[in-house]
Image (tube, rainbow, N blue to C red):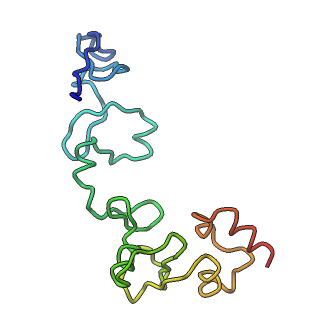
Amino acid sequence: MKMQDKNYKKRVCVVCNSPFKPNHPRSKRCEECIIWRCKKCDKPLNTNAKRIKANPNILCMECHLSQEGKRNLISTGYIQIGNQLEHRIIMEKHLGRPLTSKEIVHHINENRADNRIDNLALCDGVRDHLNRFHKDNLKNPPVHHFGRDGERARKHFKKG
């Protein structure tokens, strides 16, 4: 099925009052007047101020997809490659098998960006991880330990 070219009605730019053909049904500005541009290729972006404030280094879809395999430091402090966390990829390669969803890879020095194999430890699950590395803090474990298992793990450790 071919992708059809969108034929939106010509409009007048709200900034410069010149007529333009929009490429999005809600476009209000011509390409010259769009404030936000891709940080890599300088292509105009149709987005809003809230999204730009959240991520000032925003990329257009083409540039975003072209860096799919690159390492990115994400807001939680982990390094992400594509849509996977680097420390889990490294542990999988070291073990020679994929990790299960319950297995947790712990950073021994607690630096989430330090993904050397000698700094990583594999735990069987939330309970094993907390018992081995957060034994002194079992009644109130760090919030990041409730990600995948959520309330189930929180309830379990409040009992103890």
Task: Report the front residue among 136 and 122.
Answer: 122
User: x%, y% of residue 21?
Assistant: 23, 15
- Identify which residue is drawn at 49% across, 83% down: 122
Residue 37 rendering spot, x and y as whole percentages: 27, 37
Pinpoint residue 153: horizontal percent, then vertical percent: 68, 69
Instruction: Point out residue 128 in the picture as x, y percentages from the top left corner.
Output: 61, 83
Between residues 142 and 95, which one lies in front from this camera angle?
Answer: 95
Residue farthest front in this picture: 1
Residue drawn at the location 28% of the way across and 48% of the way down: 64
Outermost right residue: 159
For residue 4, above or below residue 121: above
Q: Is residue 101 above or below residue 48?
A: below
Q: Residue at x 38, y 84 (%)?
A: 95
Q: Is residue 144 left or right of residue 47?
A: right
Judged left or right of residue 53, residue 32 is: left
Q: Nearer the viewer, residue 53 or 106?
A: 106
